[in-house]
Amino acid sequence: MGANTSALLSEEIEEIAKESHLTSKEIKRLYKRFQKLDRNSSGTIESEELYMIPELAMNPLVPRIVSLFDGVNFRQFVSLLSVFSATAPKNEKIDFAFRIYDVDNDGVISLNDLVDLLRMMVGNNLDTATLEEIAKATIQASDSNQDDKVSKEEFTALIEKTDIQESMTIHF
């Protein structure tokens, strides 16, 4: 997968389309974008290259998002972005959102996970005690088994009430 879209063979495009929720046309557009992001032509996107995406740079959760995309090759890039397709199933979108919130990757959203995310969103505008208070209230509101954590099932039940299908859709 070299310097232009012609390096992406039609067989590869078809194969990637079957593995994702994206059309061939969307994959070609993403390949062009991937090549622009891969400034050092390494075949992967590194964190410093991701910070150059204007839409991403403005997102307060950029460190979390970058951690999921850092060091990915084109196929991995498509696989991760595929969840934002209009045709991606709701459960895949929920899984991705859960991964964003589960900062320490332990399979649950804890007080520390939420405090870390809140700190990313508000910076130093609120003190730690206030962030912990907000995080505790958030966990209590969705923690049906009262173990002071939000499991994947509890998160799913909470997210089911939102329009995640619309809010996690990007038109490529």
Image: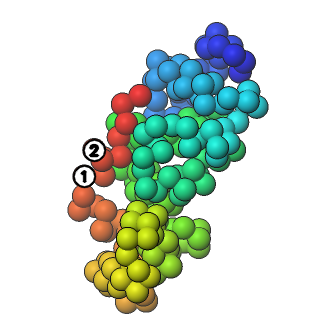
Q: Quadrant of residue 55?
A: top left
Mark 1 burial class by Cα count in 10 Å: few <14, some 14-19, many 20+ = few
Rendered position, 23 above or below 86: above
Q: Nearer the viewer, residue 42 or 163?
A: 42
- Residue at the extreme front: 125
Q: Residues within 10 Å of mark 2 (few under 14, many from 20)?
A: few
Q: Are marks 1 and 2 in contact (CB under 8 Å)?
A: yes
Q: Nearer the viewer, residue 148 or 122?
A: 122
At 60% from the left edge and 46% from the top edge, which residue is drawn?
69
Question: The N terminus lies in which quarter of the figure?
Answer: top right
Decide: is 160 above or below 153.
above
In front here: 148 or 62?
Answer: 62
Q: Residue at x 47, y 43 (%)?
A: 56
Quadrant of the rendering where the C terminus is positioned? top left
State the image coordinates of residue 45 (x, y, percent, origin top left): 66, 38
Q: Residue at x 61, y 14 (%)?
A: 5
Amino acid type indicated by mark 1: Asp
Say left or right for 136 vs 107. Answer: left
The residue labelled by disc 1 is 163
Q: Is residue 167 above or below residue 33?
A: below
Q: Secondary structure at mark 2?
A: helix
Measured in 3D between alpha carbons, the distance from the residue under mark 1 to the one under mark 2, in whole angstroms, is: 6 Å
Q: How many marks?
A: 2
> Based on the displayed image, in which of its 4 quarters is residue 46 positioned?
top right
User: Which SS class for mark 1?
Assistant: loop
Q: Which mark is residue 166?
A: 2
Q: How is the image coloured?
A: rainbow
Find residue 167 and report its horizontal and vertical position in percent. 30, 47
Residue 135 visible here: no
